[in-house]
Every structure is written in C-alpha cells, then in structure tokens.
Image: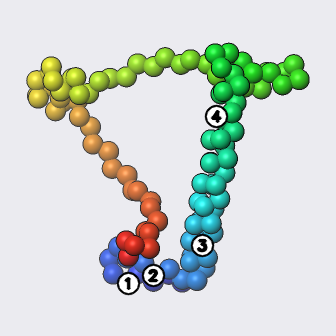
C-alpha cells in the first residue's frame, strides 16, 4: 500500500512501482515507434510530391491535403487593444501536469 509521507508526497508501494516501470518502458517504445513513423511518413510525403491522394492497388490509402486555418493573433491584439479589454477576455484554467522525473533532476 502506498503511504503518504507528507502532504502531497506519496511513497509508492511495489505494485505501483511496477506500473511506473511499465509506463517508462511503454514511453520508450512509443518514442522508438514515433521515429519509425516519422521516417515512413517522410518517404510517403516525398512519394506524393504535389499530389493529394496516394493509391495502393487501386485503392485510396493516403490523403495529403492542404488545410487552411484561422487563428486569433493575441500578440497583435495586445498591441492594438486597451489593457482593460484584454483583461476582460483573459481566462484562467487549472490542470495537473504529469511528468517523469529524470535521473539528473532528483
């Protein structure tokens, strides 16, 4: 059973430590496969060139389309709008961030 050492600090039990090891292992495998995926995607994009659709044996297997997006330029808004307006538009969100502590950060 994990034990709370002090407020906000938990000492993991062996069962939870096992999940930690599995998580670290899975993250490493994901990184390895992401590298493979990035290389494969680059080859596919190169093969497509300017084309938007790739076929394999007569069937559509890849789409590489242009997407246009519009975003709100907050930097420009801060330059031209009064601070009072910016303050009215600001919102604050709170969330928890999950990170693994690196060996050199301990």
Tell me if mark 4 has few (under 14), some (14-19) or many (20+) residues whose alpha carbon lies within 10 angstroms of its own: few
Task: Please say if the residues under marks 3 and 1 sit with CB atoms less than 8 Å apart.
Answer: no
Classify mark 2: residues with Cα within 10 Å, few (<14), some (14-19) or many (20+): few
Q: Nearer the viewer, mark 4 or mark 1?
A: 4
- The reply to whether residue 63 is visible in this rendering is no
Which label sits in the foreground, 4 or 2?
Answer: 4
Question: What x and y, as percent, mark residue 57?
Answer: 89, 23
Determine the residue positioned at 62% across, 66% down: 25
Residue 45 at x, y percent in the picture: 65, 27
N-term-proximal mark, 4 vs 2: 2
| Helix, strand or loop status at disc 4 | helix
Mark 4 or 1, nearer chain start: 1
Q: Which residue is mark 1?
A: 5
The quadrant of the picture occupied by the N terminus is bottom right
N-terminal of the two: label 2 or label 3? 2
Q: Residue under circle 2?
A: 11
Work out whether mark 3 precedes mark 4 in sequence or the reverse, and give the earlier one: 3
**Measured along the vertical axis of the image, is residue 92 above or below residue 47?**
below
Q: Secondary structure at mark 3?
A: helix
Question: Is residue 55 shown left or right of residue 1?
Answer: right
* Upstream in sequence: badge 2 or badge 1: 1
Q: Nearer the viewer, residue 94 or 61?
A: 61
Q: Quadrant of the C terminus?
A: bottom left
Name which residue lies at 15% across and 24% down: 79
Image quadrant assignment for residue 70? top left
Q: Is residue 45 above or below residue 91?
A: above
Mark 3 highlights which residue? 21
Q: Which residue is mark 4?
A: 42
């Amino acid at each position: 059973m994990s034990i709370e050492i002090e407020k906000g600090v938990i000492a993991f039990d062996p069962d939870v430590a096992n999940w930690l090891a599995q998580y670290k292992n899975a993250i490493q495998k994901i990184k390895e496969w992401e590298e493979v995926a990035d290389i494969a995607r680059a080859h596919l994009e190169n093969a497509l060139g300017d084309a938007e659709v790739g076929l394999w044996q007569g069937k559509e297997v890849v789409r590489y389309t242009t997407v246009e997006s519009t975003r709100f330029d907050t930097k420009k808004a801060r330059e031209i709008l009064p601070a009072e307006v910016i303050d009215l538009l600001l919102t604050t969100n709170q969330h928890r961030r999950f990170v693994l502590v690196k060996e050199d950060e301990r």
